[in-house]
Amino acid sequence: MSGRRGGDATVSRRWATVPRRAAAVPAADGRHTPRDGPRGLIALSDASIAVVVFLITYAAIISERVHKTTAALAGGMALILLRVLDTEQAFEAVDLHVIFLLAGMMIIANTMASTGVFQWIAVRAAKVARGSPPGVLVILCAVTAVLSAFLDNVTTVVLIAPVALVVSSTLNVRPVPGLIAIALASNIGGTATLIGDPPNILIAAHADIGFVEFMLNIAPVPIITIAGFLGVAWMIAGRSTAITDEARQRVMDLDDTELIKDYRLLWVSLGVLALTLAGFLLQGPLGYDPAAVALMGGSLLLLLTRADPHHALREIEWTTLFFFIGLFIVVAGLEETGVLASVGERAADLAGGSEVASALILLWMSGLLSGIIDNIPYTVTMLPIVDELNAGIGLTEDDGTSVLWWALAMGADLGGNLTVIGASANVLVASLAERGGHPIRFVEFLLWGIPTVLASMLIATAYLWLRYLAF
C-alpha cells in the first residue's frame, strides 16, 4: 500500500533512522525488553505490545463492528499512549507521499466526475461490449492493468473505479465484484515495471536496477497472471451478472452525446490530467515526487476553473486518508520494535544459505506479510536482510542482479491482493464503494483475494524456478 517515489535510495524522510528512546533500547541479545514504569498488571516488551495492538486492530477491521478508520486510528494512538512509539516516530511513520498523492488525484477525479465524462466512458464501454457485464468487466480490468504498469495504482483506480460504478448502475448489476476485480487488476499490472508499485522503486534504487532490466525480468509474471485473471473474471461475471434483453437494449439505445454536462470544464480537466500523467512518467528527469505532481495538478485545476475549494476539498475521501494515517502508525510499531526484522532474520536462518530456499521462502513470506501489513515498511526492512541472504549464498555485485530481488518484488507486489487493506488501491476502492452505498465486506474481498494471490504466487514460483533456479 502506498504512493510512488523518486528513484533514489533516500526516497523520503520516512526512511531516515529515528533514534529510539532510552526506555525502548533493545537488550544485548537484540530483543526488546520490558520497560520500567507502570504498565498495568503485566510488564510487556515493546515488541509484544506492538504485536497485540496490531492483532486487535486487524481483528476490529475484519469484524467490521468498528469502522476501519476508527480501528486504525485507535490502534495508532494506543501505541503512542503506551509509549511504544513517541510522537516523532509516529508522525515520521505517516507516509505523506501517499496522503498527498491521494488528495491531489481525488481533486482532479472529482472535478472530472462533475462533467459527466465517467458516465460517457461507461456507456461507451457498455456499447463496445454489446451490453455484456462480463465484457465490460474485462475491458475495464485490462485497461486498469495496462495503466497501472506505467502510472501509480492509486491514480489508475481513482480514474477507473467511478466508471465501474456508473456501468453497474447503467446495467443494473451489483458493482462490488467489478470493483474488487479492478483493484486486483491494478495490483497485478503494477508489478510489471519499476515505476508500477512502490516496493519496485525501493528495490530498484537499493540494488541499482534499471527500468528495462526490471521489466524484462518481472513483466512475464504479471502478463501471464492478468491473462488468466481476465479469463476467470469473465466466467465469474458471466455466471453472476445476467441481465435481461430489455436492459441490454436500454444500454444500446442510450445517447452518450448528452451525458457531458460541461465541455469547457471537461477539456480543462483533461488538459490538467494529461500534464499530471506526463509529470508521473517524467518524474526522474524532472526531479519531482509524484505526490507533489498530483498536488500541483489539483491546485492548477482549482486555479483554472475557479472552483469553490470548500466543495472540492469536501469531496476528498478523508476517511480513506485517515485510515492510512492510522495504519502507517500501527505498522510502524512492528517496524520500530524489530518485529519485522526478526521475521526476516528467522527466514534467513531457515534458508540456510541455499539460493533456491532463500528465493522461495522470500517470495512466499513477502506474499503473505504484504497482504496483511503495509508493503512499504516491509520492503524497506527486508532490503538489508536480502543483502545478507545474497552474501550467505556467495553472490556479489559482479554476479549480476540476484534472483532474490525479483522474489522480493513479486511477493511484495502480488501479496497486496490478499486482503482489502493489503494495498492502497484496495482501500480506495472499498471507500468509493462505501460512499456509493455498496460496502465491500472484508470476507468478500478475501474470497477473491485468496485464489488470486495463490494463483499468482504459484505462477511466480514456477517462473523463478524455471528461469533462474532449476538450471
Image (cartoon, rainbow, N blue to C red):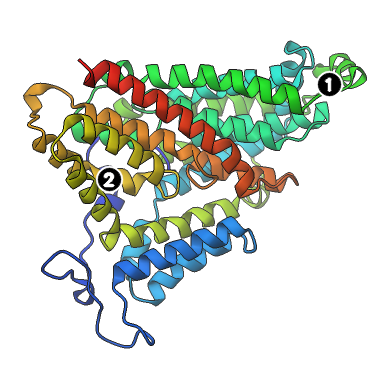
Name which residue type carries label 1: Glu
Quadrant location of the N terminus in the rendered image: top left
Near-viewer residue (430 or 418)? 418
Q: Is residue 248 toward the left or the right of residue 274 in the image?
A: right
Q: Tell me the crowding category of disc 2: few under 14, some 14 to 19, or many 20 or more residues within 10 angstroms, Cα based.
A: some
**Rendering coords of residue 240 (x, y %):** 75, 28
The image quadrant of residue 140 is top right
Location of residue 176 with respect to 185 vertically, above or below: below
**Rendering coords of residue 6 (x, y %):** 31, 35
Location of residue 452 with respect to 447 vertically, above or below: above
Location of residue 287 with respect to 321 vertically, above or below: above
Q: Is residue 299 visible?
A: no
Near-viewer residue (181 or 353)? 353
User: Residue visible at 40% across and 20% down?
Assistant: 221
User: Residue visible at 77% across and 17% down?
Assistant: 132
**Rendering coords of residue 30 (x, y %):** 16, 64
Q: Is residue 16 toward the left or the right of residue 413 in the image?
A: left
User: Residue visible at 43% across and 38% down?
Assistant: 415
The image quadrant of residue 230 is top right
* Label drawn at residue 258: 1
Q: Is residue 131 toward the left or the right of residue 461 in the image?
A: right
For label 2, the residue is 380
- Secondary element under disc 1, as helix, strand or loop, is helix
Near-viewer residue (355 or 270)? 355
Name which residue type carries label 2: Val
